[in-house]
Image (spheres, rainbow, N blue to C red):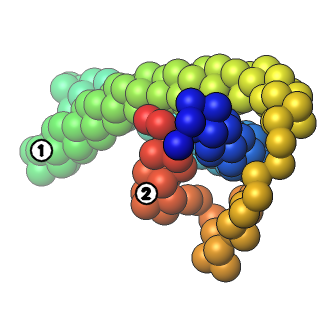
Amino acid sequence: MSDASIQTVIKAEAAHVLHSVVEELPDARERLAYVRGMTEQAATKVLNLIDTAQVDAEAVRKKGMELSDALGRLAMASDLSIERARAMMKLCATYAADAASFASRERSLHTEIMMSQDFQDLSGQVINKVSKMLERAEPPLRDLLDAMPAPADAPAPSADELTGVQTPDKALKQDDVDDLLASLGF
């Protein structure tokens, strides 16, 4: 085989591979946008729930502290003559203090959960960067592909290849994410 025919074969194979890659770019962008949207939706939901829970926890904490203080003062009142009532007041004060402490711990945990949601911001930035790179790469690749000879025997897509996002109401399975990342070379 001559050098010219080897180069022709290499160019034809490169055109075939390039054609395949260019055809997959819109689907890759669509899938990345879907993942970004689902991630953002989940993070927003968690953050909204945490905001609500923090308001509730703060209200319980304040009420618990107020109750604890009031019951503590009542238990020490000189005009309260029933010893059993005093013991009950002390128990109630202890309970209220424990409830307030619980609410403080829960509020702290909610803050930690909220701070852990920064993954969405970071993953969103990465996905946006890859999407923009794909948007920039697709037109010149299409132009290059148009300038090359058409592949002689481009295989038809198999029946089990799905195009576009198939489950807009469900999160992707880990295997789907792994396949997408592998197809992008990650």
Is 105 placed left or right of 164 in the picture?
left
The residue drawn where x is 19% and y is 26% is 76
The residue drawn where x is 12% and y is 50% is 84
Task: Judge whether residue 78 can be spotted in this image.
Answer: yes
Residue 34 is situated, as x and y percent measured from the top left of the image, at 70, 47
Q: Secondary structure at mark 1?
A: helix
Residue 122 is situated, as x and y percent measured from the top left of the image, at 52, 22
* Residue labelled with disc 1: 87
Q: How many numbered discs sit on the rendered protein?
A: 2
The residue drawn where x is 64% and y is 32% is 4
Residue 63 is situated, as x and y percent measured from the top left of the image, at 45, 33
User: Label 2 crowding class (10 Å Cα cut-off): few <14, some 14-19, many 20+?
Assistant: few
Is 92 placed left or right of 104 in the picture?
left
Indicate which disc, 2 or 1, sits on the residue closer to the N terminus.
1
Amino acid found under the numbered disc labelled 1? Ala
Tell me the tag on residue 174. Answer: 2
Q: Nearer the viewer, mark 2 or mark 1?
A: 2
Q: Secondary structure at mark 2?
A: helix
**Real-space Cα separation, disc 2 to disc 1, in angstroms:** 57 Å
